[in-house]
Image: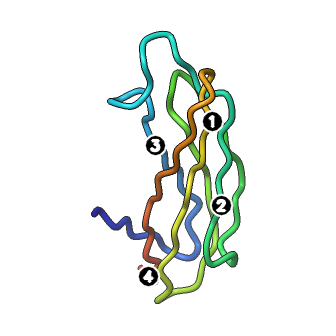
């Protein structure tokens, strides 16, 4: 499992490529919802394009580990979720 490192003052983008090995031919993302735990990191924006769900986050507390979880529903009604782990460190 990869852990990304982020400075508490940074605003960074993260993404999950659902098209790579998950979406079937002709299938698209119907909905994409991000959650952040713990909730003291801020979601600045989120979106999806061409099977890739993305999120832009800011803040966080140095020394804390965060899970950015993306839950999707596809155009064929399938659902799944994947998470990104981010450790906040003062840099």
Q: CA distance from mark 1 to mark 2?
A: 15 Å
Position of 35 relative to 59 (above/below): above
Using the image, tell me which numbered label, if any, was put on residue 73.
Answer: 1
Residue indicated by mark 3 = 16
Q: Residues within 10 Å of mark 4 (few under 14, many from 20)?
A: some
Label 3 vs 4, first from the N-terminus: 3
Residue at numbered disc 4? 89
Tell me the distance, in whole angstroms, between the alpha carbons under discs 3 and 1: 14 Å
In the rendered image, residue 55, in percent from the top left (x then y), is placed at 60, 49
Q: Quadrant of residue 12?
A: bottom right
Which tag is nearer the camera, tag 4 or tag 2? 2
How far apart are labels 3 and 4 at the CA level?
22 Å
Q: Quadrant of residue 8?
A: bottom right
Asked if disc 1 and disc 4 are in contact, CB closer than 8 Å, the reply is no
Choose mark 1 or mark 4, whichever is in front: 1
Among numbered discs 3 and 1, the one appearing first in the sequence: 3
At 58% from the left and 73% from the top, the residue drawn is 9
Query: Is residue 81 shown above or below 6?
Result: above
Residues under numbered marks 3 and 4 in contact, where contact means CB atoms less than 8 Å apart: no
Q: Which element carries disc 3, helix, strand or loop?
A: strand
**Sequence order check, earlier mark of 1 and 4:** 1
Question: In the depicted view, which residue is nearer to us: 28 or 47?
Answer: 28
Quadrant that contains the N terminus: bottom left
Question: Which residue bears the numbered disc 2?
Answer: 35
**Residue 86 x, y percent position in the rendering:** 45, 69
> Which callout, 1 or 2, points to the residue nearer the camera?
1
Marks 4 and 2 sit apart, C-alpha to C-alpha, by 21 Å
Give the mark nearer the N terminus: 1 vs 2. 2
């Amino acid at each position: 499992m990869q852990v990304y490192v982020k400075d508490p003052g940074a605003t960074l983008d993260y993404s999950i490529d659902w098209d790579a090995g998950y979406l079937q031919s002709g299938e698209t993302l119907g909905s994409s919802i991000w959650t952040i735990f713990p909730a003291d990191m801020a979601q600045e924006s989120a979106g999806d394009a061409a099977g890739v769900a993305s999120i832009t986050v800011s803040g966080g507390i140095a020394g804390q580990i965060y899970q950015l979880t993306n839950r999707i529903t596809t155009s064929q009604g399938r659902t799944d979720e994947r998470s990104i782990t981010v450790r906040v460190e003062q840099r």
